[in-house]
Protein backbone atom coordinates (compact mmCIF):
# COMPACT_ATOMS: atom_id res chain seq x y z
CA UNK A 1 0.00 0.00 0.00
CA UNK A 2 2.77 2.44 0.93
CA UNK A 3 4.60 1.68 -2.29
CA UNK A 4 1.54 2.32 -4.47
CA UNK A 5 0.82 5.57 -2.60
CA UNK A 6 4.42 6.71 -3.11
CA UNK A 7 4.24 5.69 -6.76
CA UNK A 8 1.01 7.67 -7.13
CA UNK A 9 2.62 10.77 -5.65
CA UNK A 10 5.62 10.32 -7.95
CA UNK A 11 3.31 10.63 -10.96
CA UNK A 12 1.00 13.31 -9.58
CA UNK A 13 3.48 15.77 -8.08
CA UNK A 14 5.16 16.76 -11.37
CA UNK A 15 1.74 17.61 -12.76
CA UNK A 16 1.06 20.11 -10.00
CA UNK A 17 4.51 21.62 -9.50
CA UNK A 18 3.46 25.15 -10.40
CA UNK A 19 0.07 24.85 -8.78
CA UNK A 20 -0.73 25.39 -5.14
CA UNK A 21 -1.25 22.04 -3.37
CA UNK A 22 -2.72 21.90 0.14
CA UNK A 23 -3.35 19.04 2.55
CA UNK A 24 -6.91 17.85 2.97
CA UNK A 25 -9.98 18.11 0.78
CA UNK A 26 -11.09 21.20 -1.14
CA UNK A 27 -12.81 23.94 0.81
CA UNK A 28 -16.48 24.53 -0.01
CA UNK A 29 -16.71 28.31 -0.44
CA UNK A 30 -19.94 30.22 -0.83
CA UNK A 31 -20.65 31.26 -4.41
CA UNK A 32 -22.44 34.29 -5.85
CA UNK A 33 -26.10 34.24 -4.87
CA UNK A 34 -28.68 34.98 -7.58
CA UNK A 35 -25.94 34.57 -10.19
CA UNK A 36 -26.94 35.89 -13.64
CA UNK A 37 -25.06 33.93 -16.29
CA UNK A 38 -26.00 36.30 -19.13
CA UNK A 39 -24.59 39.31 -17.28
CA UNK A 40 -21.34 37.42 -16.63
CA UNK A 41 -20.76 36.77 -20.33
CA UNK A 42 -18.20 38.82 -22.22
CA UNK A 43 -14.55 39.72 -21.93
CA UNK A 44 -12.67 39.36 -18.64
CA UNK A 45 -9.01 40.19 -18.00
CA UNK A 46 -6.88 38.33 -15.48
CA UNK A 47 -5.78 40.76 -12.76
CA UNK A 48 -4.22 38.30 -10.28
CA UNK A 49 -3.99 34.52 -9.88
CA UNK A 50 -2.62 31.64 -7.93
CA UNK A 51 0.24 30.22 -10.02
CA UNK A 52 -0.93 27.83 -12.73
CA UNK A 53 1.21 25.63 -14.96
CA UNK A 54 -1.09 26.28 -17.93
CA UNK A 55 -0.80 30.08 -17.69
CA UNK A 56 2.73 31.22 -18.44
CA UNK A 57 2.23 34.27 -20.62
CA UNK A 58 1.02 37.81 -20.18
CA UNK A 59 -2.10 39.68 -21.25
CA UNK A 60 -4.28 36.75 -20.22
CA UNK A 61 -7.96 37.20 -20.91
CA UNK A 62 -11.05 35.06 -21.40
CA UNK A 63 -14.17 35.71 -23.42
CA UNK A 64 -17.38 33.92 -22.46
CA UNK A 65 -20.23 33.61 -24.98
CA UNK A 66 -23.57 31.93 -24.27
CA UNK A 67 -24.48 29.45 -27.01
CA UNK A 68 -27.99 28.56 -28.16
CA UNK A 69 -27.87 25.22 -26.30
CA UNK A 70 -27.08 27.14 -23.06
CA UNK A 71 -23.50 25.91 -22.99
CA UNK A 72 -20.74 28.51 -22.91
CA UNK A 73 -18.05 29.11 -25.51
CA UNK A 74 -14.86 29.90 -23.59
CA UNK A 75 -11.94 31.44 -25.47
CA UNK A 76 -8.83 32.15 -23.41
CA UNK A 77 -5.75 33.87 -24.75
CA UNK A 78 -2.29 34.95 -23.68
CA UNK A 79 0.84 36.36 -25.22
CA UNK A 80 3.78 34.02 -24.77
CA UNK A 81 7.17 34.61 -26.38
CA UNK A 82 5.73 37.40 -28.55
CA UNK A 83 3.06 35.06 -29.93
CA UNK A 84 -0.70 35.29 -29.31
CA UNK A 85 -1.95 31.90 -28.17
CA UNK A 86 -5.62 30.98 -27.90
CA UNK A 87 -7.47 27.97 -26.61
CA UNK A 88 -11.18 27.30 -26.93
CA UNK A 89 -13.25 25.32 -24.48
CA UNK A 90 -16.79 24.70 -23.35
CA UNK A 91 -18.46 25.71 -20.14
CA UNK A 92 -21.62 24.41 -18.54
CA UNK A 93 -23.74 25.20 -15.52
CA UNK A 94 -23.15 22.11 -13.41
CA UNK A 95 -26.11 22.61 -11.07
CA UNK A 96 -29.14 24.55 -12.33
CA UNK A 97 -30.04 25.35 -8.69
CA UNK A 98 -26.60 26.90 -8.24
CA UNK A 99 -25.69 28.55 -11.57
CA UNK A 100 -22.52 30.19 -10.19
CA UNK A 101 -20.93 26.71 -10.13
CA UNK A 102 -19.71 26.34 -13.68
CA UNK A 103 -17.61 23.60 -15.19
CA UNK A 104 -15.11 24.27 -17.97
CA UNK A 105 -13.23 21.86 -20.21
CA UNK A 106 -10.68 22.63 -22.91
CA UNK A 107 -10.68 19.04 -24.20
CA UNK A 108 -13.28 16.52 -25.30
CA UNK A 109 -11.50 13.77 -23.40
CA UNK A 110 -11.13 15.53 -20.05
CA UNK A 111 -13.95 16.10 -17.57
CA UNK A 112 -15.21 19.56 -16.69
CA UNK A 113 -13.13 21.35 -14.06
CA UNK A 114 -14.88 23.42 -11.41
CA UNK A 115 -15.06 27.13 -12.23
CA UNK A 116 -16.98 28.71 -9.39
CA UNK A 117 -17.92 32.38 -9.36
CA UNK A 118 -17.54 33.37 -5.71
CA UNK A 119 -18.43 37.00 -6.26
CA UNK A 120 -19.04 39.42 -9.11
CA UNK A 121 -20.63 42.78 -9.76
CA UNK A 122 -20.66 41.89 -13.50
CA UNK A 123 -19.20 45.27 -14.55
CA UNK A 124 -15.87 45.54 -12.72
CA UNK A 125 -14.69 42.44 -10.88
CA UNK A 126 -15.21 38.70 -10.58
CA UNK A 127 -13.63 36.23 -8.15
CA UNK A 128 -13.26 32.72 -9.53
CA UNK A 129 -12.20 29.55 -7.72
CA UNK A 130 -11.40 26.05 -8.89
CA UNK A 131 -10.29 23.09 -6.82
CA UNK A 132 -9.59 19.42 -7.43
CA UNK A 133 -9.20 16.79 -4.71
CA UNK A 134 -6.35 14.31 -5.15
CA UNK A 135 -7.28 11.08 -3.38
CA UNK A 136 -8.95 13.23 -0.66
CA UNK A 137 -5.45 13.55 0.84
CA UNK A 138 -4.66 16.93 -0.67
CA UNK A 139 -6.10 19.34 -3.17
CA UNK A 140 -4.86 21.61 -5.91
CA UNK A 141 -6.61 24.91 -6.27
CA UNK A 142 -6.68 27.89 -8.55
CA UNK A 143 -8.05 31.35 -7.88
CA UNK A 144 -8.40 34.33 -10.16
CA UNK A 145 -9.33 37.95 -9.77
CA UNK A 146 -10.83 39.06 -13.07
CA UNK A 147 -11.68 42.54 -14.27
CA UNK A 148 -13.51 44.06 -17.20
CA UNK A 149 -10.43 46.24 -17.76
CA UNK A 150 -6.73 45.36 -17.67
CA UNK A 151 -6.14 47.15 -14.37
CA UNK A 152 -7.93 47.44 -11.07
CA UNK A 153 -7.53 49.66 -8.00
CA UNK A 154 -5.35 48.05 -5.33
CA UNK A 155 -8.16 48.43 -2.78
CA UNK A 156 -10.43 46.30 -4.99
CA UNK A 157 -7.72 43.63 -5.33
CA UNK A 158 -7.22 43.61 -1.55
CA UNK A 159 -10.97 43.30 -0.94
CA UNK A 160 -11.04 40.35 -3.37
CA UNK A 161 -8.16 38.65 -1.55
CA UNK A 162 -9.96 39.18 1.76
CA UNK A 163 -13.05 37.48 0.28
CA UNK A 164 -10.98 34.46 -0.72
CA UNK A 165 -9.43 34.30 2.76
CA UNK A 166 -12.85 34.47 4.45
CA UNK A 167 -13.77 31.40 2.41
CA UNK A 168 -10.71 29.43 3.67
CA UNK A 169 -8.85 29.83 0.38
CA UNK A 170 -5.14 30.45 0.83
CA UNK A 171 -4.14 33.27 -1.52
CA UNK A 172 -0.80 34.03 0.12
CA UNK A 173 0.91 32.93 -3.13
CA UNK A 174 -1.38 34.98 -5.39
CA UNK A 175 0.57 36.99 -7.94
CA UNK A 176 -0.40 39.94 -10.13
CA UNK A 177 -0.93 39.16 -13.80
CA UNK A 178 1.10 41.01 -16.40
CA UNK A 179 -1.29 43.19 -18.40
CA UNK A 180 1.15 45.83 -19.72
CA UNK A 181 1.75 46.36 -23.44
CA UNK A 182 -1.14 44.14 -24.41
CA UNK A 183 -2.73 46.36 -27.03
CA UNK A 184 0.37 46.57 -29.19
CA UNK A 185 0.32 44.66 -32.47
CA UNK A 186 2.35 41.47 -32.37
Image (cartoon, rainbow, N blue to C red):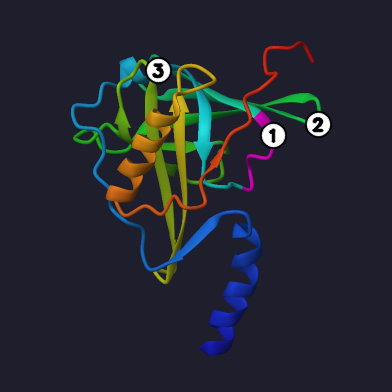
Res 115 visible: no
Q: CA distance from mark 3 to mark 2?
A: 29 Å
Q: Residue at x 57, y 54 (%)?
A: 19
Q: Which residue is mark 1?
A: 57
Q: Which residue is mark 3?
A: 41
Q: Which residue is mark 2?
A: 81
Q: CA distance from mark 1 to mark 3?
A: 23 Å
Q: Quick check: 110 above or below 25? A: above
Is 125 situated left or right of 17 in this image? left
Q: Earlier in the sequence, mark 1 or mark 3?
A: 3
Residue 121 placement: quadrant? top left
Marks 1 and 2: CB-CB under 8 Å? yes
Residue at the extreme bottom of the image, as rendered = 2
Is 47 situated left or right of 129 in this image? right
- Which span of residues is magenta-colored? 53-58
* Residue 35, label in figure: none
Give the camera-side residue of 156 and 108. 156
Give the camera-side residue of 136 and 173. 173
Amino acid sequence: MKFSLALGFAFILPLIRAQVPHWGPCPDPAVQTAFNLKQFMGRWFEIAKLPAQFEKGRCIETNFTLKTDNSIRVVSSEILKAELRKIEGTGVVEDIKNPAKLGISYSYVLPYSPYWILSTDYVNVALVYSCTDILRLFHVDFAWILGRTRSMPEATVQKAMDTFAKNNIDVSRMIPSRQQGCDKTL
